[in-house]
Amino acid sequence: MADTMQFDLVSPEQKLASLQVSSVQIPGADGQMTAMPNHAPVITTLRPGVLHVKGPEGDVSYAVTGGFAEINPEGLSVLAEKAIPMKDASMSDLEPVVEAARTAASNASPETRDMAELLLADLETLLEDMV
């Protein structure tokens, strides 16, 4: 069994990471999940939250506002809507995203209100984690 796997994190603006890691905890659509080498193939959407990356060179975390993750036995690729290294993140980076989610939740139809409110709650939790 391999000790590491390839991890790639990209957003529409830039490639944020491409490195060998031992595990990555992701905020999956159905809850937190941890990808490790030789993981079964999975594709999932991401909720807003924090990616926690553990590697031979140390640990690093990234705030993400959503996106997709593809896990396979060789590694993990994440395409994030927006991603920021936690060491560089500020509340002002995510406040416009949270404000847009508030507006969307208040204007949501009855059919989509639950999902809009869940997204808003996830984003507000992400902001709290940044403090």
Image (cartoon, helix red, strand yellow):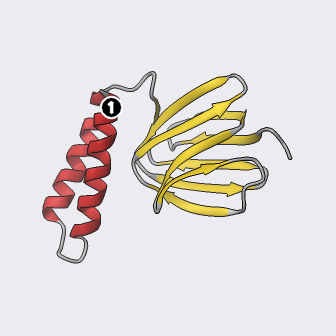
Residue 113's place in the image compared with 54, above or below, is below
Identify the secondary structure beneath mark 1. helix
Between 19 and 96, the one lying in front of the other is 19
* Quadrant where the image shows the C terminus: top left
Please tell me which residue lies in front, 104 or 63: 63
Q: Position of 98 compared to 126: left or right?
A: left
What residue is drawn where x is 23% and y is 77%?
Answer: 111
The residue lying at 51 percent from left, 44 percent from top is 12
x and y, in percent, of residue 101 in the image:
24, 52
* Residue nearer the viewer, 128 or 15: 128
Within 10 Å of disc 1 (Cα), the crowding (few <14, some 14-19, many 20+) is some
- Name the residue located 25 percent from the left edge and 36 percent from the top edge: 95
Kind of residue at disc 1 = Asp
Between 67 and 27, which is closer to the camera in this rendering? 27
Is residue 34 placed above or below 31 in the rendered structure?
Answer: above
Q: Is residue 5 left or right of residue 84?
A: right
Can you give x and y, in whole percent of width and height, for residue 63 in the image? 44, 37
Q: Is residue 18 above or below residue 121?
A: above
Q: Read off the residue under disc 1.
A: 93
